[in-house]
Amino acid sequence: MQQPQLDYYDMGPDVVAFSSTRHGGCSEGNYAAFNINRYCGDNDDNIRQNREALCQLLGISDSQLVMPHQVHLTKVAKIDRAFMALDTTERQGALEGVDALMTDLPNVCIGVSTADCIPILLYDSVHHALCAIHAGWRGTVQHIAVKAIQAMTETYGTQPQHLMAQIGPGIHLDCFEVGDEVYQAFAQEGFDMSTISRRYPTSDGLGEKWHIDLPECNRQQLLAAGLLSESVKVSPVCTFLQSADYFSARRLGINSGRIFTGIINPY
């Protein structure tokens, strides 16, 4: 089996931050080749082998690789020593319905799974605290990034101006067509629609549909929460356009693999 091929991000000295690509691993079909998400229909043995390969590459054990079962809400879970002491079943229960993880433990990789939704990584270099966020359109409209920063502030004393942020690969404006109800959901939450939306002709040429810029929505939320503009980086990867290299549910269907975007505390 080929080693997983990862895209790495520069978020500070010794911080390991990355998103997986479709390359490396042993999954097949629309899961090919690297998928570690247990909730999208992939073969359990392939998932196990892929996790083992990733852990070997990162230099951690399987128990140090933590990912939640996401449900497009805004629950943030703290990964602490009490969590790490739980058995497998207890961990699964604690990670159910969670869309963001935070930790200040060393050598623990927290991460989220996406396939068009937006992954966000945060690093507080003062308190050596990390956060991984899953922001689909539902999470974005519910301000999950802001809520995650608030949770870090309450838990670790994080100050937003000290955070580094990386917005990972996801679907971009040109490709994220939405219904009027989604547009209205963002408008009702007070987003500046002139900066995050645009109408495009439909593929049949018979009308127009709204498109939403999810990376920009989340970038604006991070800045509004107090992050410095130079501390927020955005991946140029559109998963829909680059589905040969990154999983895209809109291209491949929901029964397909997921990108894993993770971060490891060096201290």
Image (cartoon, grey):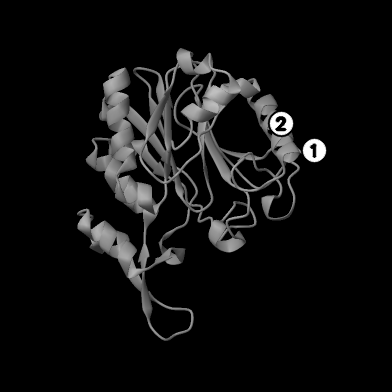
Q: Nearest the camera: 172 or 61?
A: 61
Per the rendering, the mark at residue 241 is none
Quadrant of the image for the N terminus? top right
At a point 64% along the width and 39% down the height, the residue shown is 36
Disc 1: which residue:
1
Task: Quadrant for residue 135, please give it.
Answer: top left
Q: Residue furthest right?
A: 1
Rendered view: 257 above or below 130: below
Instruction: For residue 15, say whether it is visible.
Output: yes
213 lies left or right of 81: left
Disc 2: which residue:
53
Rendered view: 77 above or below 210: above
Q: Residue furthest bottom?
A: 206
Is label 2 in a helix, a strand or a loop?
Answer: helix
Q: Position of residue 87 (x, y in %)?
A: 58, 18
Which amino acid type is shown beneath numbered disc 1? Met
At a point 28% along the width and 44% down the height, the residue shown is 221
Q: Position of residue 228 (x, y in %)?
A: 28, 36
Which amino acid type is shown beneath numbered disc 2? Ala
Q: Residues within 10 Å of mark 2 (few under 14, many from 20)?
A: many
Of pointers 2 and 1, the one earlier in the residue sequence: 1
138 lies left or right of 266: left
At a point 72% along the width and 44% down the height, the residue shown is 43
Q: Position of residue 66 (x, y in %)?
A: 54, 28
Q: Position of residue 196 (x, y in %)?
A: 30, 59
249 lies left or right of 119: right
Is label 1 in a helix, a strand or a loop?
Answer: loop
Cβ atoms at labels 2 and 1 below 8 Å apart: yes
Rendered view: 236 above or below 97: below
Q: CA distance from mark 2 to mark 1?
A: 9 Å
Instruction: For residue 240, say whether it is visible.
Output: no
